[in-house]
Image (spheres, rainbow, N blue to C red):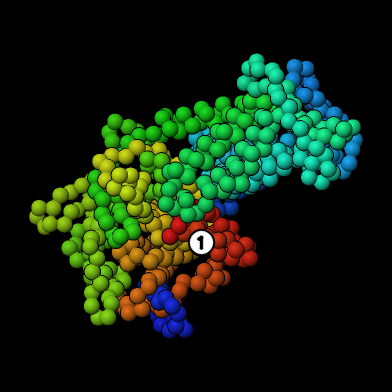
Amino acid sequence: MPNPYGTEVDIQQNEPTTEAHLELSNSREFPLPMNERDLCAINAATRKEPWVRYETLFWVVWIVFTLIAVCDRLWINSWPRESFGKDGYGTDKRNVIDGPWTVQLYDVTARISGRLCITALMGICVTILNVVFNFLSESKTLQKYVFLWDWREANLRIHKALGITLALSTVPHVWSVLFPVFFSSYSLQFETVHETELRFPISEAKSCIEMNTANNTVCIDSDDLGRLIGMTIMFCIMIPITVSKVFLRFRYSLAWKLHVLMGFLYTVDITRRRTHPHTWVLNMPLFVVVGVNAILSRYLYRVAELDVVKTVVLDGKYTLVFLKRNPKYTYAESLVGDVWWFNGHPFTVLSNKGQKWEGVGEEQQEEPSWEGHKFQIQEGGQVVRQDTMPSMHRISLHQQGGEDSEDIEWDYTVIMQVFEGTPSKPSGTEKIISATSVKSQGPYRATHGLLAHTGVNPPLVLIASGSGGTYLVEFLMHLREHNITPVHPVKIYYTARSIPLFQLITDQLCRNPAHNTTVHAALTVAEPTLDYTPSHPKRDMQLGRLSIGEVLQAAPKGAEVHYCGSGGLLEEIKQRCKGLDLKLHEGDTFDA
C-alpha cells in the first residue's frame, strides 16, 4: 500500500529575481477502495452530458436571428417602418439610395447597424436576468438538455461581446449620415423642428434627416445632433470608464451605478424615437422583463439579512467576516462556491458544514511559526508576528481568552479584500465589516456547484488564489459531510501573498484530505528572508513560483479545471487550458 502521506520533497533554488517566492507542496494521496458506492459512481459517470451548453445555444440563436434581421433590411424589407403607420415613422426603401459612394455607404451602414443595435440590445437584456437564470439552473429537467452551471460566467462573456457589438454599431449608425459631408463635399444644414406635440414615445413625430443628392446637402435637426454627441460620449468615454479595472477596484459601486445609468439612457433614447418602431416590438417587452427581474432580485428573490457576528482582521488587506442567519428569513440550500451579494457587492461565500476547523481556539494561532500550522513561517530566525488570526471550532467561533471565551454561532463566512474609503465616505467593504447586519441576496449558483456532484465528475484540477480559496475549503468539507470518495483524482492548488490568509486556508486544506486528492500550496511574498519549518516529516516546501504551465501539463487526461481568484492569473489559465484542450470552469475573479 502506498504511503498515505506521500509527498514530493524536492528543494531547489531558482535563479534570483526581484521578488522571492515560496512554494509549499503538500501532497496526500490515498488508495482508492473499490466499494459499492464507488461502483455506483463509476456507472453514473457514464451518464449522458446535456445536449448543448447554454452559451453555445445563445450564440446560435442570436446569430441566426441577427442574420435574418439584417438580410431582411438589406434585400427583402418584409417588415418596413411604414407598416406601423404613416405618421412620422419614416419609410424603408428596398433599393440603396442613388448617389456617390459615400451616400450609398451611409445607407448600407445605417441599415446594418440599425438592426445590429436592436438585436445586440435584446441579447444584453437577456444576460442581466440573474433571477431567471438562477431559477432555470436549478431545474433538474432542464439540466438534462442544457448545461447551465456556468450561466453567470457565460452571461458576463456574452454581455461584454454584445456591449462591444452595440458600441461598434451605434457610433457608426449616428455618424454615417456625415460620410458625404466628410468625403464628398456635401453641405450640412440644420433644420428647426416645428412640430412640438409630444406623441408616444415622447419624441418628435418625424425624423428630419434628409439626404438631398440633387442639391448635395445633408439636413439634420437638433435632436439628431444631440444623439450624435451623446452616443459618442457614452460609448467612447463613459462606458469604458465604468468597466475600467482601476475604477472597478476603488469605486465598484459607483462604476456599477454609472454603467446601469448609461444602459438606462440608451434604452430611453432608442425607444423614444418614432423612427425606431421595431424597438417597441422587439426591445420593449424585454425592458419590462428586465425591470421585473430587477425588482425581484432587489426586494423579493432570496433577499434577506444576515447578522455580522464577528470580524477578524487577518492583515491590512484581508478581513474574515462571520455571518449568521436571521430567524425572520428562510434561506436556500448552499452548494459549493455559491455567490452572494452583500450590500450590492458580490462575494464567493463558504457555508458552514458543521465540521471542526483544524488548529483553532489556540492563542498561538496568530503566530505564523506556531507548530499547529501546516506550514510554519519565520523571518531571519525570528517569528513573523501578525495582529490577529481567527479561532474557529465546528459551528462556533471561539474568541481567545481561555475560560472567559465566548462561543459565537455562524452559518457563513466570507474573506473580504477591504478597500479604504474616506472618514466621511467609507468604502462598501468597510461598511460591511463595521455593520451589525447586512442585506443579503443569494445564494446564486456558480460553476463550482458542479463540485457538489464529485462522485460522478471527471478528474479535477482545482485552482484558487487569495480569497478565492474558500471554495476549495468548502469542496473538501462537502466531501467529508457526505462521505464522498472521488472516483477520479482531484488535484488542488492554492496560492496567496498574505501569510495569515495562506495559513488559514492551508490549515484547512491539509487536514484529513479526502481519498484520491492531492493538495499543493504556494506562498508568494516580497520578503527574501522568509524561511519555513516543516511540521510533518512528509511535508515540505520548495522555493519558486507556482507554474501554471506545469500544473496544467500534469493534469490527468480528460481533467476539468476550476478557478476562482485573481483576474490576471485567470488569463494565463485560459490560454494554457485552450492549448492543452482542457475544459475550464471560471468562477468569480477579482484583482489580487
- Most foreground residue, 483 or 309: 309
Q: Is residue 226 above or below residue 496?
A: above
Measured from the top left, where is residue 392 in percent x and y?
24, 55
Q: Is residue 303 left or right of residue 278?
A: left
366 or 39: which is nearer to us? 366
Which residue is painted at 26% across and 69% down in the image?
368
Going by the numbered disc 1, the residue's amino acid type is Gly
- Which of 19/226 is in front? 226
Residue topped by disc 1: 568
Position of residue 452 in the picture relative to residue 513 (left or right) = right
Question: In which quadrant of the rendered image does the N terminus lie?
Answer: bottom left
Q: Position of residue 71 (x, y in %)?
A: 81, 37
Left or right of residue 246, residue 305 in this image: left
Q: Quadrant of residue 493?
A: bottom left
Which of these two is toward me, 173 or 23? 173
Residue appearing at x 36%, y 78% in the figure: 528
* Furthest residue toward left: 403
Residue 263 visible in image: yes
Callout 1: SS: helix
Q: Position of residue 230 (x, y in %)?
A: 61, 37
Quarter where residue 129 is shown? top right
